[in-house]
Image (cartoon, rainbow, N blue to C red):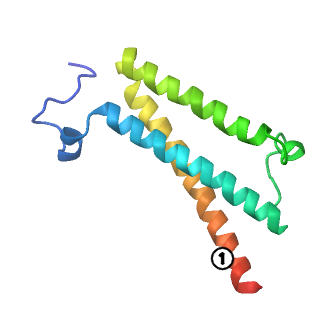
């Protein structure tokens, strides 16, 4: 009886409509978009002279290909991980989904801070 997935009658309407694979990929895509928007906002702020890169590993390499590679390589690895979990690790799907949601929430907070900073700059001159 432990750790059994709910029967079709016990599932909520959203769970019944969306298979786990779709939900994992949806959260991955949201994380990918948030990650790339962070990169765009960061470069926008840097070009305006209003932002300073907070990551000390990226700071010396900002105007090279390394930041893009440092963003895309982990995201590609994460995509392979999601695929592996969907293929063989059904028992890990809930944990991976939670991790994707947490990472997306963190990036959403970062994006909100970027937007607030850009708005503050727009209104102050």
- In the rendered structure, the answer to whether residue 40 lies left or right of residue 49 reads left
- In the rendered structure, the answer to whether residue 18 lies left or right of residue 86 reads left
18 or 7: nearer the eye?
18
Q: Is residue 116 above or below residue 38?
A: below
Residue that appears at 64% across and 36% down: 72
Residue that appears at 66% across and 31% down: 73
Q: Splitting the image into 4 quarters, where does residue 41 fall?
A: bottom right
What is the quadrant of the N terminus in the image? top left
Determine which residue is flagged by label 1.
119
- In the rendered structure, the answer to whether residue 47 lies left or right of residue 78 reads right
Residue 38 in the image, given as x and y percentages of width and height: 65, 54
Give the farthest residue toward the left: 9
Query: Can residue 120 be seen in the rendering of this structure?
Result: yes
Residue 18 in the image, given as x and y percentages of width and height: 25, 39
Q: Splitting the image into 4 quarters, where does residue 89 fall?
A: top left
Q: Splitting the image into 4 quarters, where does residue 71 fall?
A: top right
């Amino acid at each position: 009886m432990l750790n059994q997935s709910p029967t079709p009658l016990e599932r909520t309407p959203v769970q019944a409509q969306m298979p786990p694979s779709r939900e994992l990929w949806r959260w991955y895509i949201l994380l990918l978009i948030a990650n790339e928007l962070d990169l765009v906002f960061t470069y926008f702020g840097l070009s305006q002279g209003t932002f300073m890169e907070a990551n000390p590993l990226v700071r010396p390499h900002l105007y090279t290909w390394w930041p893009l590679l440092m963003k895309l390589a982990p995201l590609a690895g994460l995509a392979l991980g999601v695929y592996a979990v969907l293929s063989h690790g059904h028992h890990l799907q809930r944990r991976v989904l939670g991790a994707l949601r947490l990472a997306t929430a963190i990036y959403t907070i970062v994006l909100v801070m970027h937007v607030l900073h850009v708005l503050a700059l727009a209104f102050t001159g």
